[in-house]
Amino acid sequence: MAFDLIRINDLRNLTNCEIAPHTGLNLIKGENGSGKTSLLEAIYILGRGRSFRDKQISNAVQRGKSSFTVFGKKGSKFNKSAIGVSCSKKGTNLSIDGEKISKLSLLAKETPIHIVTPKSQELIEDGSSVRRRFLDWGVFHVEPLYQQFSFRYQRALSQRNKSLRESWKTANIWNKELHESGSKIQEYREIYFERLKEQLLIQMEMLEVKYDLEVAFYQGWPKEQTIKKMLDDGMAGDKNRKFTRMGPHRADINFKIKSDKFNKWGSRGHLKLVVFALFFAQANVIKSMTNKETILLVDDLTAELDEKNVERVIAHMINQKNQTFFTTTDYRLCIERNVGKMFHVEHGVVS
C-alpha cells in the first residue's frame, strides 16, 4: 500500500513538513542541502525504523530540538493503516495504528522500502555482506519462518565461535543446530534467488543493459557437502582460525561477465542500471509472492546516468506502478501530471 500522507517534525532541517504524495511517481527537486535527502530519510524511517544516512538514528533530531517524529498514513479505501516513529536521545518509539510495537521487523513487514543512493553500486562492488543483506531482506518478506531460523543460526554460530576461541572441544555441540537452521536458511535463499535471477534478467533487458551477465548464488560452502559434513571436516581449520569459516553466513551473489567480475567491465552508469534492475526485480518478486507493494526511494536519480538512461529509468518506474520518491537538482527534469506529483524543497520547506 502507498502512503497518502506523510508528516515530519524536527527531523534535520525539516521542521514542520506535510505532503500528500502520489501513489505513483513523486519527483522532489531542490538545491544541495535543501532537505531533499532528509525527506527520503524520513520515509525510509517509516519502513525500517532506522536511518540510511547514520548508524545512530537519534543524530537525525534537528539541532536544538529534543526529538523528531514521522507519521505516515497509507492504504486503500477499505484498508488503511497509520505508522508513527518518534526518536530522542533516550530511544525510539514505534507504533502501527496507534499500538506501540517493540520490534523493527514488524515495521519492516508492514512497509517494504528500498533506497537507491549514489553509493548503491556497493551492492555489486563491495564485499559479500552487502549482497547477503539484500538477499535476506527479500527472503524475510516472502518467507514467514525465515527470521526464526536466521535467529537460531546466528545464536548457534556465535556460541560455536566463542567455543573455538575459548575451549574448542565444546564447539562441535553446536553443529547440529547450525545444520538444522542453516539448511532451512539455504533452502529459502535458493528458492528466492532463482525467482530474483529470473526477474533480474527481465529487468535488465527492459532497461537495455546490453551485457551477457552471469548471476550465480554461492551458498557459503562447497555445494556437494551438507552443512554438517562441512562443519565436521573443517573442524581442524576452524580450530586454528578460531572461527567458523564456512556456512550460510558466507553466502554471496556473484556477478560476472565472460568469467570476470562485473565491476571490472561495467561503466559507472551501467553499474547503476544493474542496481536499479536488482531493486525492480526484488520488488516484483515480493509482489508476486506476497502481494505487497515495495516503496522505492531514489536519491539523486541523475547521478552517473546520461539523459537517455534517466528517461529510460523513469519510464520503467511508471511501468512498475510502485510508489516512488526520487530527488534531483536538475530543474529541467519533469514528469506528467497523470503519473505523479512534483515537489520543491528549499531551506527545509516542501511545497
Image (spheres, rainbow, N blue to C red):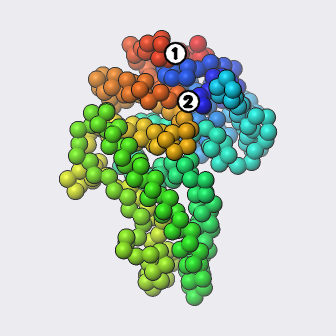
**Amino acid type, mark 1:** Lys
In this picture, is 71 found above or below 180? above
**How many circles with numbers are drawn on the protein?**
2
Circle 2: element type: helix
- The vertical placement of 203 against 341, above or below, is below
Q: Residue at x 28, y 23 (%)?
A: 308
- Looking at the picture, tell me which residue is in the foreground, 77 or 183: 77
Upstream in sequence: badge 2 or badge 1: 2
Q: Type of residue at label 2?
A: Leu
Residue 133, percent across and down?
A: 50, 52
Q: Which residue is mark 2?
A: 40
State the residue position of label 1: 341
- Give the percent coordinates (x, y) of residue 149: 60, 63
Quarter of the image for the N terminus: give it. Answer: top right
Circle on res. 319: none
Question: Residue 269's image quarter?
Answer: top left
